Image (spheres, rainbow, N blue to C red):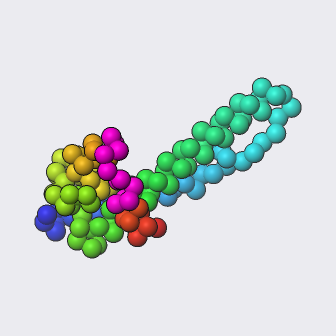
Amino acid sequence: MTKGELEKYRTALEEKKAGIVASLKNREDIAIEKAADAIDEVQLAGERELAIRNLDRESHLLREVRAALARIEDGSFGTCAHCDEEISPKRLKAVPWAPFCIRCQESADRHEFEAAEALDEFLADAA
């Protein structure tokens, strides 16, 4: 991968990181509110649960983006964390934080190998 391509990915990842960090600052939605009506309480609880799930998803994505930035720094960006094959440029263009090639990602999605172990290493370094 050329230095120009790496810079392009670094810029895209930095922009994604900045967007996620900005969205994570909005935590008012998880505040516990009381309502006089029981139905309103249930609705508020549902909205709070949705906000918590969104924060969790965004936090996880932020860790993946940071891990991708760390892979750029250590020179392993663009290489599958499982099989050490090159991740296709088409996949990296779509998902620049992807730690696995498409074949290994599909295997991980089917739980054919422990993607969590390989990914946890990268995420721990990025945190």
Residue 30 shows in this picture: yes
Residue 84: image x %, image y %? Answer: 19, 61
Q: Position of residue 77 (x, y in %)?
A: 24, 64
Look at the image and say whether residue 49 sits in the magenta stretch. no
Task: Please tell me which residue lies in front, 104 or 93.
Answer: 104
Q: In x, y percent, where is residue 95?
A: 29, 49
Q: Residue furthest left?
A: 2
Q: Is residue 7 visible?
A: no
Is the N terminus in the top left, top right, bottom left or bottom right quadrant? bottom left
Seen as rendered, the residue at the extreme right is 36
Is residue 110 covered in magenta? Answer: yes
| Front in this rendered view, residue 54 or 17 | 54
Question: In the depicted view, which residue is nearer to us: 35 or 18?
Answer: 35
As displayed, is residue 51 above or below residue 85?
above
Residue 79 as seen in the image, left or right of residue 24: left
Q: Looking at this rendering, what residue extends furthest in the bottom direction?
A: 74
Question: Which residue lies most toward the top here?
Answer: 39
Q: Find residue 81 and report its image quarter.
A: bottom left
Q: Quadrant of residue 34?
A: top right
* Magenta region: 109-119
Q: Is residue 93 left or right of residue 29?
A: left
The residue located at (74%, 31%) in the rendering is 42
Q: Residue at x 38, y 59 (%)?
A: 117
The quadrant holding residue 35 is top right
Residue in the image at 43% along x and 60% along y: 63
Residue at the spot 22% in from the left edge and 71% down from the top edge: 75
Is 15 displayed left or right of 78 in the figure?
right
